[in-house]
Image (cartoon, rainbow, N blue to C red):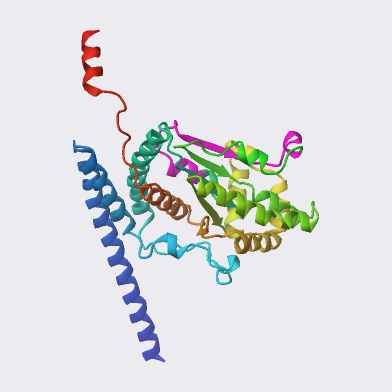
Amino acid sequence: MAADTGKKQAKKASKTKKETAKRSDIGKKLKKIEKRIAKINTMDDVVERMTAAAKASEKLSSVFTQPPAQRLVFRKNETHLTDIDAGSTPGFHGTKEECQRFLDLSALEIERYQQLMYANGTRGDMRRVLIILQGMDASGKGGIVKHVFSQVNPMGIHYHGFGAPTAVEKDHNYLWRIRKELPNPGWIAIFDRSQYEDIVMPHVYGTLPEDEWMQRYDEVNEFEHNLVASGCAVLKFYLVSSKEAQKQHFLGRLDDPRKFWKFDPSDLEARDRWNDYMTAWQDVFERTSTTWAPWYLIPSDQRWYSRMVVSELLRNTMKNFNMTWPSLDVDRESIINQLNER
């Protein structure tokens, strides 16, 4: 008995030691990356600067033991929403403080790639990004927008939250209001809820005949396929929260007069139907996680972790566009001479 206890203690101590070593390693990596990024801005050569930025981005990704794009992507018939530990941080063994350092550095690189994408968009390049954020109430969708995009230029960012359809929107096809908010060339659009509400809500509440909302799966897949084919990267994130964490966030809202406005009694009805929502969302993932627009299921009880993952996947998506700065389409010397003469 004593021997078994000793083995368990030794195993626990060994695990703790390894995790401490990993955290220490992350801190060292981040310090080196900070120096790399600071050096980039001193470079005069544009090509050299972009190459250095790509390398810095790769180093940032190395803080994960496994890329989130692999670890968190939904796998049909393998991934089950209800099996995910909402309080876990898969692939990252660092601290909350190290996560914040990561976010600060990643935001600088997102800004760099956003400017590049926007500049190309003004010249007719069709590359752009659509981010879809889904999750139960109080899962942290708004916080992601606030933290991940802290450094970006507002010019080139479009945010839209979708609520219940208005009377005007109900007079149109359910994708009508979605199309109106899509990103322009060179822009990033962020959807807080999306077209998937028009599948999940009738699924849970029975507000439409089953055959009507079921056919929307194929329609949404085709819609997203056409978007991707036209140059728009579609990033779909579902923030996996626990029922207990949601309860604590609701109580926090009710304890703070500044947050009363965030609470809606209808949130309790959705909470009562938690299991129905889980079933509906599992069906969404099974039918709409595609090779061109996969779903990523991100544990979000540790909100800093979900923000970190979204930042990581967005930064890499834009980096992989492999864009260069658009060239000047006028005679540079002639323009300079004209300016000097005026």
In the rendered view, tell whether residue 175 sits above or below residue 340: below
Query: Left of 210 or right of it: where is 119?
Result: left
Query: Left of 341 or right of it: where is 169?
Result: right
* Towards the viewer: 64 or 211: 211
Whether residue 314 can be seen here: yes
Q: Residue at x 63, y 44 (%)?
A: 254
Residue furthest to the top: 342
In the rendered view, tell whether residue 163 sits above or below residue 102: above
- Highlighted range, magenta: 143-170
Whether residue 260 can be seen here: no
Q: Residue at x 52, y 42 (%)?
A: 190
Q: Give the image quarter of residue 18.
A: bottom left
* Towards the viewer: 203 or 276: 203
Q: Position of residue 28 (x, y in %)?
A: 24, 57
Q: Give the image quarter of residue 17.
A: bottom left
Q: How many marks?
A: 0
Magenta stretch encompasses residue 51 = no
Q: Quadrant of the N terminus?
A: bottom left
Q: Position of residue 142 (x, y in %)?
A: 53, 43
Magenta stretch encompasses residue 156 = yes
